[in-house]
Amino acid sequence: PSLQSCHLPVLSPPAPSQLCSLSVFIFKVLKYKNLGKLVGMPVPGTMSSVNWITLQNPDLLFGVPVVAFRTADGTVLENTQLEPDIKVANHPADIVKGIDAQLEAAVKSLLSDIDKQKK
């Protein structure tokens, strides 16, 4: 089957602090194509490709934007935020205890979708 005919399970992007633009790319595609639900927190992303350059002084590093990502209709995704379908935060105290609220919400949503399909 093609990607258009598949409906993927609930997905959750990594924590916003662990992301760069390209790591959020697949989640943006899934959301744009409506291929599954996203669970988690909003993730800002520049959605541009940057060449990192140093000059004579290796301590000076700067990025030069080279490519911006666009949707099929031409919408530029630069500086857009990825909004989850189900907004759930993971709290550090819960994570230490082995509780993943995002995973729990994703499984709950998936089970609910399965129940709806059975009816």
Image (cartoon, rainbow, N blue to C red):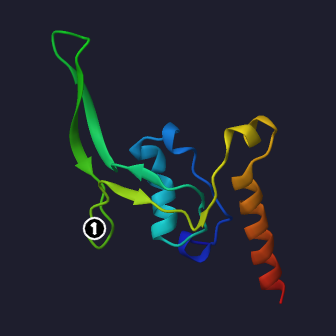
Residue 56 picture location, percent across and down: 15, 10
Q: Which residue is mark 1?
A: 75
Dot 1 crowding, Cα within 10 Å, few <14, some 14–19, many 20+: few
Q: Quadrant of residue 69?
A: bottom left
Q: Which residue occupies the extreme bottom position in the image?
A: 119
- Residue drawn 54% across and 63% down? 84
- Residue drawn 57% across and 51% down? 13
Q: Nearer the viewer, residue 118 or 38?
A: 38
Residue type highlighted by circle 1: Thr
Image quadrant occupied by the C terminus: bottom right
Image quadrant occupied by the N terminus: bottom right
How many numbered discs, if any? Answer: 1
Against 112, is 53 above or below? above
Q: Nearer the viewer, residue 59 or 87?
A: 87
Q: Which residue occupies the extreme left position in the image?
A: 56
Against 115, is 39 above or below? above
The reply, left or right, for residue 49 in relation to residue 86 is: left
The reply, left or right, for residue 14 in relation to residue 61 is: right
Q: Which residue occupies the extreme front position in the image?
A: 93
Residue 109 picture location, percent across and down: 73, 69
Residue 11 picture location, percent across and down: 63, 58
Q: Nearer the viewer, residue 92 or 67?
A: 92
Q: Quadrant of residue 4?
A: bottom right
Against 58, is 112 above or below? below
* Circle 1 SS class: loop
Q: Nearer the viewer, residue 111 or 94?
A: 94
- Residue drawn 66% across and 48% down? 90
Residue 116 picture location, percent across and down: 78, 84
The reply, left or right, for residue 16 in relation to residue 21 is: right
